[in-house]
């Protein structure tokens, strides 16, 4: 729940230099379709030992950090070092010393697009020294081709090798392991192939399901009902062992949910009852499982954020996560839609034997695995997260046994990727490389999940000083780029933004600042509603703001005052944002984002949400995408001839509609547009249909 700024290379779209790609597949847009092709290593008649053409599209930085393009950005200048005609490259690559313990050893993988007969490896040894090796993927393992301590200075080093592989991996032991340029020699064994893939058609979600929020089991359900889905923060230890130092855990698991392990004499959290109450209220439960059970980390305080593995286990091996995969199996077996054999259930004494309760459809395996604030023990590199997800999704394709993995228990359960604190294309790409190597390209999640907070970070300090509006942050454009990446690589997956929001404390670095006569609480409400609108337009499938309640309204720390309501101890008093969110969800009930309507002005934005299946009704949302107290009076908006049009304004103290019928003249209505969105509901009948005034009135 702590975040740093979004760091896509460009705020608008993938740069031409880094078109969306995975491995050896380059991609670009052609008239609504993706052109995909394996990277050409050379002409089909290239002789063994000739230079291999290396391009950035082949490269993936497996640390999830910025592309390591400096390794191949001077290929022409590099010349032919094998023939003694190597040039002197000028640029070097290092990921640097900041958070080096999280990212090193650092691997860069080249996907050559097809199998290549490798003959020679050359690299320009620059300043610094440290361990460096080159490996090739061979029979499901990495085979060492050469290694070097990089003790030379500004000189080419070469190694003759003999290998056949599509994948080549460079591994740097530390930030001091520096080379300037990498050159590869070999001959392609398969010709390049190209295909045109149409951009997939997707049905956008209805807005009552799209609008969600984050919350806890002890939040009142009537307050959570402002959203259609609650991302419920759920600690593993609550279900297994809690703080009992004598609990042994896997393989002698003993789960407790009704009541949970968080219980005492005569009381306890009852998750059976909680999820049933959410379902009855029409709220989709989407638990996010946080942290390790205490028995995994030796019952030591302060280690709950550590990866759920023993110190001697390999974090890139799915088998290391058997305990976690077994726990998620048990949860899915109880709350999913599939009944399992009672003998598979591992329950604490006194628990009712239940399975297939049909109370939960989405399960998120972890929270912010790419965090930088919990040390190496708490930071997942992309390969490590992919390995854990593979275990959690289907028991690593069934290899972990019959009691591991969400899909093993309930094939209908939707598994949600852990929400990334830093929504990096490179991190996602590195995960996909791991899946190509270990799962034949199958991505072990049904939902791609990201976090992003709109603020002014990116200056000299790199830390935010205040929140900014979604328009100033280019939120729609940033998310559109990530949606396009999803469409290219995982078109069948959903994509969520499961954390975003603003504080209301005037000193918070994530604050929504007062604007003119508008208070910080009002601006928070405006920017949140506009964020949901931007995310719907971008093609995001679900959006969940952070979070229902304030933690400490008087604390200026980030995320302490980001709630839709006040604190739990104060009784969750609603802020204007709670009323705005609840009202917007009602107004847009049953609609899907359809398109942006040109307003003819830079200071007025219009989105249309279409009612389905009713073809003759829609809701237009209008607002000023500014942060200066802008008001556009007497704005003329076009509507359908014969339409009945109602203006709906959001209130700061009520979730009920405040609707006013507008007069239509010459196919237009007049209204005032401000920085708080307003909603125009239009309904009409085609001329061929008969109607009376009561029918029209009933549509408003």
Image: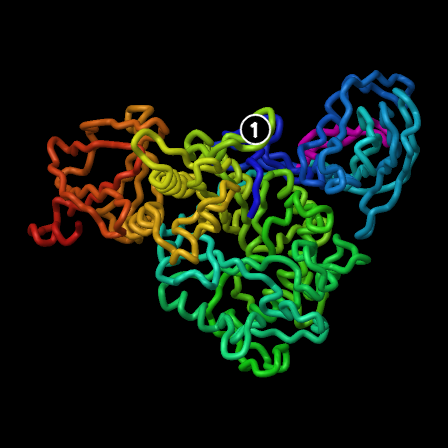
Magenta stretch bounds: 38-58
Residue 364, image x and y in percent?
Answer: 56, 57
* 665 relative position to 381: left or right: left
Residue 611 x %, y %: 28, 49
Query: What secondary structure is the magenta-colored segment mainly?
Result: loop
Give the answer, above or below, for where 239 lies relative to 177.
below
Q: Secondary structure at mark 1?
A: loop
Q: Is-magenta flag for residue 47?
A: yes
Name the residue located 80 percent from the left edge and 42 percent from the top edge: 165
* Residue 44: x %, y % from top left: 76, 32
Label 1 crowd bin: few (<14), some (14–19), many (20+), radius 10 Å: few
For residue 621, above or below residue 369: above
Q: Is residue 526 above or below residue 221?
A: above
Magenta stretch containing residue 309, yes or no? no
Residue 280 placement: quadrant: bottom left
Is 7 situated left or right of 282 in this image? right
- In depth, the one of 514 and 112 nearer the eye is 514
Which residue is tagged 1? 458
- Image-quadrant location for residue 663: top left
Furthest-front residue in this view: 554
């Amino acid at each position: 729940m702590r975040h740093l700024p979004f760091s896509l290379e460009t705020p608008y779209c993938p740069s031409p230099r880094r078109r969306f790609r995975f491995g050896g597949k380059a991609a670009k847009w052609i008239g609504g379709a993706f052109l995909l092709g394996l990277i050409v290593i050379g002409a089909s008649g290239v002789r063994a030992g000739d230079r291999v053409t290396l391009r950035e599209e082949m490269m993936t930085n497996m640390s999830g950090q910025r592309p390591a393009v400096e390794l191949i950005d001077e290929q022409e200048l590099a010349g032919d070092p094998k023939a003694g005609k190597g040039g002197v490259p000028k640029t070097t690559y290092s990921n640097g010393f900041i958070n080096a313990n999280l990212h090193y050893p650092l691997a860069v993988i080249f996907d050559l697009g097809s199998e290549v007969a490798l003959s020679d490896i050359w690299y320009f040894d620059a300043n610094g020294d440290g361990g460096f090796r080159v490996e090739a993927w061979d029979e499901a393992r990495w085979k060492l081709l050469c290694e070097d301590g990089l003790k030379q200075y500004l000189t080419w080093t070469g190694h003759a090798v003999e290998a056949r592989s599509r994948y080549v991996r460079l591994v740097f032991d530390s930030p001091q392991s520096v080379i300037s340029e990498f050159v590869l020699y070999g001959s392609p064994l398969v010709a390049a192939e190209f295909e045109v893939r149409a951009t997939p058609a997707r049905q956008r979600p209805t807005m009552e399901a799209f609008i969600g929020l984050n919350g806890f089991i002890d939040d009142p359900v009537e307050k959570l009902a402002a959203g259609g889905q609650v991302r419920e923060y759920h600690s593993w230890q609550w279900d297994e062992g809690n703080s009992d130092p004598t609990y042994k855990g896997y393989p002698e698991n003993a789960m407790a949910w009704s009541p949970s392990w968080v219980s005492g004499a005569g009381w306890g959290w009852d998750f059976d009852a909680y999820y049933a109450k959410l379902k009855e209220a029409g709220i989709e439960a989407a638990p996010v499982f946080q942290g390790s059970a205490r028995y995994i980390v030796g019952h030591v305080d302060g280690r709950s954020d550590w990866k759920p593995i023993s110190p001697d286990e390999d974090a890139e091996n799915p088998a290391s996560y058997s305990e976690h995969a077994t726990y998620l199996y048990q949860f899915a077996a109880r709350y999913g839609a599939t009944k399992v054999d009672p003998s598979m259930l591992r329950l604490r004494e006194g628990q009712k034997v239940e399975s297939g309760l049909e109370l939960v459809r989405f399960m998120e395996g972890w929270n912010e695995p790419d965090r930088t604030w919990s040390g190496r023990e708490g930071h997942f590199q992309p390969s490590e997260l992919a390995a854990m997800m593979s275990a959690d999704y289907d028991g690593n394709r069934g290899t972990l046994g019959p009691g591991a993995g969400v899909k093993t228990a309930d094939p209908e359960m939707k598994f949600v990727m852990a929400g990334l604190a830093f929504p990096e294309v490179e991190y996602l790409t590195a995960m996909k490389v791991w899946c190509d190597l270990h799962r034949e390209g199958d991505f072990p999640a049904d939902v791609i999940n990201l976090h992003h907070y709109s603020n002014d970070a990116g200056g000299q300090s790199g830390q935010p000083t205040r929140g900014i509006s979604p328009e100033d942050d280019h939120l729609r454009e940033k998310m559109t780029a990530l949606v396009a990446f999803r469409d290219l690589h995982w078109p069948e997956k959903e994509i969520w933004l499961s954390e975003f929001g603003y504080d209301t404390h005037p000193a918070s670095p994530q604050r929504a600042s007062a604007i003119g006569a508008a208070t910080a609480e009002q601006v928070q409400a405006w920017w949140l509603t506009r964020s949901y609108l931007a995310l719907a337009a971008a093609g995001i499938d679900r959006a969940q703001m952070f979070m229902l309640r304030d933690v400490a309204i008087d604390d200026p720390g980030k995320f302490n005052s980001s709630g839709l309501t006040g604190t739990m101890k104060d009784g969750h008093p609603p802020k204007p944002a709670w009323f705005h969110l609840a009202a917007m969800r009602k107004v847009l009930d049953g609609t899907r984002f359809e398109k942006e309507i040109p307003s003819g002005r830079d200071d007025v934005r219009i989105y249309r949400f279409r009612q389905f299946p009713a073809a003759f009704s829609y809701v237009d949302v209008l607002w000023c995408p500014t942060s200066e107290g802008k008001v556009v009076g007497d704005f003329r908006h076009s509507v359908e001839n014969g339409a009945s049009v109602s203006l709906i304004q959001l209130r700061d103290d009520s979730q009920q509609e405040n609707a006013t019928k507008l007069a239509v003249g010459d196919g237009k209505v007049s209204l005032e547009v401000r920085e708080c969105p307003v909603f125009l509901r239009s309904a009409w009948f085609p001329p061929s249909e008969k109607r009376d005034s009561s029918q029209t009135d009933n549509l408003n």
